[in-house]
Amino acid sequence: MSTNTIKDLTAGTAGGIAQVLVGQPFDIVKVRMQTSPKGTYKGMLHCAAGILKNEGPLAFYKGTLTPLLGIGVCVSIQFGALEYAKRVFAAQNVADGRGGEGGKMLSGSQLFVAGVGAGLANGFVSGPVEHIRIRLQTQSNTNPMYAGPFDAIKKIASRHGIAGIYKGQCVTFLREATGYGMYFLVYEKLVQREMTMKGIRREQISPVNAILYGAAAGYALWAVIYPIDMVKSRMQTDGFTPSTGQKYASARD
């Protein structure tokens, strides 16, 4: 593994940890609003105020440990799958005489497919991580079913097996594939645009512009996947069997 790759993975993991810590309070509000009966909350602020009043400030960080532990693995999988796909497409471009130097200027369809591959690979880890986090975020504050992420994994696995841990996995794959496909398409196209207009290399793009491109790609990701995420949240908070309150037999329901 090259020094640059190690640096990229380390930076990605650090960024992922920061993203979890900053985004977790917003995520629990999102999940509560997605999974609560209609009319429970008037809006985001009403939901956040209710959590703060009834459960205290630490409640905004329920389920945080699971994504923190998984973020390094997720970043490594995303990076590895994405870079592999980019190398394959670059080689194809060289053979076809396109894509500029080294065939690295990938087309929109190539970027989207590379992102889809990274998302699907990532889904094997992010699926159970998201499931455990959501269970902890939505459980009763006065009579919690799980003492923490490891207790949740133990109880779910003992009662429902591996399938229980991977509940909602199909819709998770759909969300990750669609989301990462869109994210990398938008981000890389914005990067390519600046490189072409200014005649510069990727490493010469300013950090500010890179952040702005990442933000734009993030907005594009959520604009596309939010309905899928809604279904995923409902599936992953649903009962495991009809006797435990199961409402949905599949994502289609």
Image (tube, helix red, strand yellow):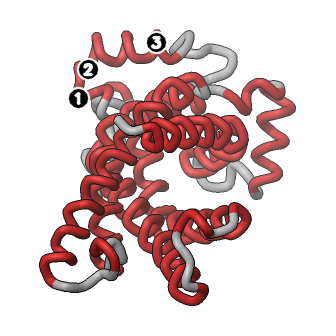
Q: Amino acid at mark 3?
A: Phe
Judging by the rendered image, the residue that carries numbered circle 1 is 163
Quarter of the image for the N terminus: give it.
top left
> How many C-alpha atoms fall within 10 Å of the one at disc 2: few (<14), some, or many (≥20)?
some
Residue position marked by numbered label 3 in the rendering = 150
Q: State the image quarter where residue 129 is shown.
A: top left
Disc 1 is placed on an element classified as helix
Residue at 56% of width from left, 63% of height from top? 203
Q: Quadrant of the C terminus?
A: bottom left
- Marks 2 and 1 in Cβ contact (< 8 Å): yes
Which one is in front, 176 or 107?
107
In percent of the image, x 43 and y 61: which residue is there?
179
Give the residue drawn at x 29%, y 49%: 81
Q: Which mark is residue 202?
A: none
Residue 142 seen in render: yes
Name the residue at 67% across, 38% down: 18
Q: Is residue 147 above or below residue 220?
A: above
> Callout 1, which amino acid?
Ala
Near mark 1 (Cα within 10 A), the count class, few <14, some 14-19 or many ≥20, is few
Tag 3 near tag 1, CB within 8 Å: no
Residue 70 horizontal side relative to residue 19, left or right: left
Residue in front for this viewpoint, 200 or 252: 200
Q: Which residue is mark 2?
A: 160
Q: Real-space Cα distance between discs 3 and 1?
A: 17 Å
